[in-house]
Amino acid sequence: MSTPAATPTNNFDVLGPALINVTVMLVLFGFTLIQTYMYYVRYPKDVPRMKLLVTVLLILDTLHVALVCHAQYIKLEVSWDAEKLLDGEWTLYANYAVNLVVCVLVQIHFTRTIYHLCQNRWRLWLTGLLTVLTIAHLGLGMATTVLIFKAWELSKVQAATDITLIPLAAARIASDLVIAISLCVLLHTHRTGVKRTNSVINTLIVYAINRFLLTTAISFIQLVVLSIDLLRLWSFGWSLDFVIGKLYLNSFLASVNSRTHLQDG
């Protein structure tokens, strides 16, 4: 990978692609609010651990949206000046760290779910592997956060994160793959002769597959786009991270809310 041009050919090179992903992010945040409201209505007596996790994730997600919107506002405010447009902004980088925590918490939740579903000798192997991949995801994400703060200028961020982007994407995709396969296999083994139960299991399997396909597709596209030495594409690839955390959180909320929704159907 190489460093993008120091100045954009026009200011849309930076603002336009990012604005697209901000719009998608806000739509997904709307789904997050709806699903969170549904959870509180349907599960007022859910276990404290789950209620705390949903609450913490909602707070972090709201903070993430606030940071992204602040960063976008600042960039729009200085859009007339190409040099200031490419200068760093702490909220633009801080939102990356918040998004990382959201993704890791969701991965930990699914790892715990797999631990309880798996009752044979594979339990320790699967959860051990997922723990390693999740720690790798967290560690590489934290390293990336440090690097982008050190680089500060947008024109230097790509070169600064070359060393972490590929292993970070690999850890994220590998973790999602193991989670998806494990959930599909384990849920399938829990099928019974009860039609309603099987319907719930089949839908949860579909959720697991869709979650993997969505997050992996976005992660792969992001990695490819970030490797291209073109500022407009690089800006789009970087801002794709605004969307990834929302996909993780909505997949988590969908799996949690499906318990009552499917049984009632």
Image (spheres, rainbow, N blue to C red):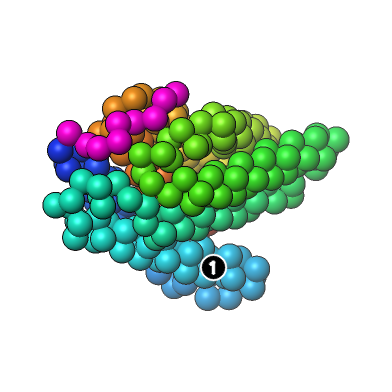
Name the residue: 74% across, 49% down.
Answer: 116
Q: Amino acid at mark 1?
A: Val
Quadrant of the image for the N terminus? top left
Few, some or many C-alpha atoms within 10 Å of disc 1 (few <14, some 14-19, many ≥20)? some
- Tell me, yes or no, whether the highlighted magenta stretch contains residue 57: no
Q: Which residue is mark 1?
A: 56
Quadrant in which residue 27 is drawn: bottom left
Q: Which residues are the magenta region?
A: 1-9
- Return the x and y of residue 183 as percentages of the image width and height: 62, 38
**Magenta stretch encompasses residue 2:** yes
Q: Secondary structure at mark 1?
A: helix
Q: What secondary structure is the stretch in magenta mostly built from?
A: loop
Question: How far across and down, in percent of the image, does residue 205 sit?
Answer: 53, 38
Q: Is residue 32 visible?
A: no
- In the image, residue 151 lies at what x, y percent? 47, 45
Instruction: Give 49 or 226, whichever is nearer the viewer.
Output: 226
